[in-house]
Image (tube, helix red, strand yellow):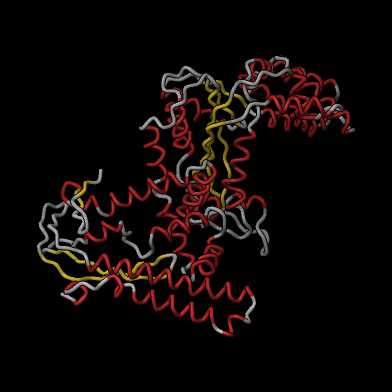
Amino acid sequence: MSAAYAKSSSPDETFSSAHEQMEKMVTALRSTKMLSAEHSEVETFVQEQGRELERLLYQAHLDLRSERERPVSVRGADEVERPYRRPSRRPLGTILGRVMVARLAYQALGVVGLHPMDASLNLPPELYSHGMSRFVAEHTAMMAFDDVVGELLTATGTAVGKRQVEEIAVRAANDFEAFYAQRRAANDVLERTDDLLVLTFDGKGIVMVPDDLRPATQKAARKKVRKLFTRLTTGEKRNRKRMAEVAAIYTVPRFVRTPFDILVDLYGEPDPEARRELRARRPKVRNKRVFASVEHDPQLVIDETFRDAEARDPKHRRSWVVLLDGNKDQIAFAKAAAKKIGVEVTIVVDVMHVLEYLWRAAHAFCEVDEDAEAWVQQRLMWLLQGRPAGKIATAMRQSARAANLDADKRDTVHDTADYLQDYAPFLRYGDAITEGLPIATGVIEGACRYLVKDRMDRGGARWTLQGAEAVLRLRALRTCGDFDAYWAFHLREELRRNHAERYADARLPDPLRPLRRVK
């Protein structure tokens, strides 16, 4: 057995290096040179030398634990006793710098050795500490991997490669789904209210490395011949993207409005007091959860959101509203998810997408923008007053024939009419605003912008599937205010899978405390 285990040092001896570093810093700060230095130079000195002091304190604490480690009985999950002990050491990369962990290894013939001190410290199997992992997780949610590399070096003095940063982020996010599943199981999200339960979905493309595109997109990308050498054209960019499904669920009180209220909200009012009064009455969204996945199929993401909704309202007593932009696949997925759990939902297609179609038709009929705006407002008012979208579509086609439009303009009008006809069951805005239901997808559009576009849609960026999924999860945790709770859960899961599951009956033979069982 090494000297470290043969005898114990006094705490003063163990922390002697830290004391020496402290004395060195105090001596330097008292020196003539430092007394004549500018404050920024003093600040840099204290920061850099203070980090080394912190690292030495950390190292001394680990050394003290190793000196006080006592022999224990170690039986693995394989029910094999490990009677042989030997000293061993492993490095640990921390936000303070690299330290060494000295501990006893317990071994037996033909089986993997175990280290009870690793369990006591909840050490990860990889090099980097959980403190380092958290730093990377929080920063990769906000900035590019390259920027995180630089931030790590500046803030901690630790050099970590870009690939390692991405790998750390992936591991840090791997308990995302389990975290929310246990919240549902524990009834942590149950809501006792009659307010609306709103579920909303959208898709957003992310540029991927070729190997991580979906099979159909991979095939299309291989067939596509580049038109330009210096940049990708619109169609070529699409063939390099994989769609992320973005979801949001929230609770909001009913907000009964009139058609005039909607027009005021959309177009303003000569008397701004009316608009301010309307916005003051608008209820606040609460208990909002947003998330996205580029790895899972849209149906799985929508099913996950419906499970969240059922956990909030298990007896289906509330009104469930599904807000979409008109994507037919998403409508089908939402209907399938609702059928699976046996709940009735009201599907509403976003009014802003309807307005886009109306504006296209308006420009086919009207040469002047003011006339086009009046045309759009009239048809929007009809929809808000409850006129069936199918009848508006029929009238639109008749107007196109009467106006003797050219082929292109006629096709534009017919496209809009077809849209209104196809989505008529989901455009019952008169009933929706009378019942106080939302008719616009602002929440999910904001989620798409924050979760995906602001972080993932940077010039030249190409994502791996694992890296993109990890960043989406970490950004979602920050957005929902769940990061601290998630991290506590993540550390418990790390202890369970990295240590407890390797011991008989999940009992950790902690060498510094009595036996404890990890559930």
Please name the residue shown 21% across and 72% down the image: 8
Say whether residue 18 is left or right of residue 479.
left
Q: Nearer the viewer, residue 229 or 439?
A: 439
Q: Give residue 385's position: percent from left, percent from top.
A: 73, 15
Q: Give residue 215's position: percent from left, percent from top.
A: 47, 48
State whether residue 322 is above or below residue 7: above
Q: Give residue 482's position: percent from left, percent from top.
A: 48, 43
The reply to whether residue 405 is visible in this rendering is: no
Badge count:
0
Q: Give residue 98's position: percent from left, percent from top.
A: 39, 71
Quadrant location of the N terminus in the rendered image? bottom left
Q: Residue furthest bottom?
A: 32
Quadrant location of the C terminus in the rendered image? top left
Say whether residue 66 is left or right of residue 221.
left
Q: Nearer the viewer, residue 216 or 379?
A: 379
State whether residue 263 is above or below residue 226: above
Please name the residue shown 30% across and 58% down the image: 121
Please name the residue shown 37% across and 67% down the image: 58
Say whether residue 396 is left or right of residue 201.
right
State whether residue 486 is above or below residue 358: below
Q: Nearer the viewer, residue 418 or 167?
A: 167
The reply to whether residue 308 is visible in this rendering is: yes
Asked which quadrant contains residue 107, the reply is bottom left
